[in-house]
Every structure is written in C-alpha cells, then in structure tokens.
Image (spheres, rainbow, N blue to C red):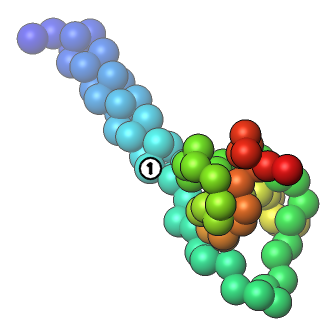
C-alpha cells in the first residue's frame, strides 16, 4: 500500500468519526417541566406534540438559551388538533 492510499484512508476514517461525534452532540436530553420552573428561552427551535389524539398529551419544546446552548423540556398540554372541539 502506498502513502497516498494510506493518507486517504486515514482522512476518510477521521471524517467519519467526526460525523458520528457531531450526530451524538445533536441529541439533547430533555427535562420534565415543573410548575414554576424558570426557562431561559432566547429562541424556540421546535414544538412537537407526542400524539395525534385528543385530550391531554405529551409535548416537547426545543429551544436555545441565552448562551446559545440547545435545551429541551417535556411537558403536558391539551391537544390543539382535535376535530371534536366545540
């Protein structure tokens, strides 16, 4: 094996390890909201409702705090897309 092939193989291996590390860093561990918690929300990234059912459901708010760190909080809410609402 010549040096050119060895160098290219090492480069691709390093890039693939960096990609795996970046994907792992994107996962944010959410905490459960408790009444009275102070949330440092600078920008909302997403709001996801856990199910399409009516009534009280689980939801997740993903946001950036004032330091630019991605945070997530799980909470309970009333579903917004119920067809039976009066």
Q: Would residue 42 appear left or right of 72 to someone viewing this image? A: right
Residue 54: x and y, percent? Answer: 64, 53
Report the residue that reaches farthest toward the left. 1
Image quadrant holding the N terminus, namely: top left
Q: Is residue 73 above or below residue 17?
A: below
Residue 6, image quadrant: top left
Residue with the most extreme bottom position: 36
Q: Position of residue 62 (x, y in %)?
A: 70, 56
Rendered residue at 68%/78% (across/down): 33
Q: As rendered, which of 21 and 3 lies closer to the eye?
A: 21
Disc 1 designates what residue?
Answer: 24
At x 71%, y 54%, the residue is 79
Say which residue appears at 77% left-offset and 87% top-offset. Answer: 35
The number of numbered badges drawn on the structure is 1
Task: Pick the residue in front: 70 or 39.
Answer: 39
- Quadrant hosting residue 39: bottom right
User: Visible in this render: residue 14?
Assistant: yes
Expressed as whole percent of the image width and height from the top left, the position of residue 10 reads: 28, 26
SS assignment at label 1: helix
Q: Along the line of sight, which residue is nearer the eye, 71 or 6?
A: 71
Q: Does 23 sit left or right of 17 as displayed?
A: right
Q: Quadrant of residue 76?
A: bottom right
Examine the rendered structure and indicate whether residue 5 appears above or below residue 72. Answer: above
Residue 72 visible in this rendered orientation of the protein = no
Q: Position of residue 13 (x, y in %)?
A: 29, 29
Q: Is residue 75 above or below residue 11?
A: below
Q: Residue at x 66, y 70 (%)?
A: 75
- Does residue 34 appear to the left or right of 27 in the view shown? right
The residue carrying pointer 1 sits among few (fewer than 14), some (14 to 19) or many (20 or more) residues within 10 Å by Cα, namely few
């Amino acid at each position: 094996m010549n040096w050119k092939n060895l160098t290219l193989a090492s480069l691709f291996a390093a890039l693939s390890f960096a990609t795996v590390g970046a994907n792992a860093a994107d996962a944010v561990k959410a905490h459960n909201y408790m009444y009275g918690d102070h949330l440092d929300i600078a920008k909302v990234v997403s709001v996801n409702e856990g199910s399409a059912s009516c009534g009280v459901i689980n939801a997740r708010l993903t946001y950036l705090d004032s330091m630019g760190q991605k945070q997530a909080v799980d909470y309970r809410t009333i579903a917004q897309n119920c067809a039976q609402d009066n």
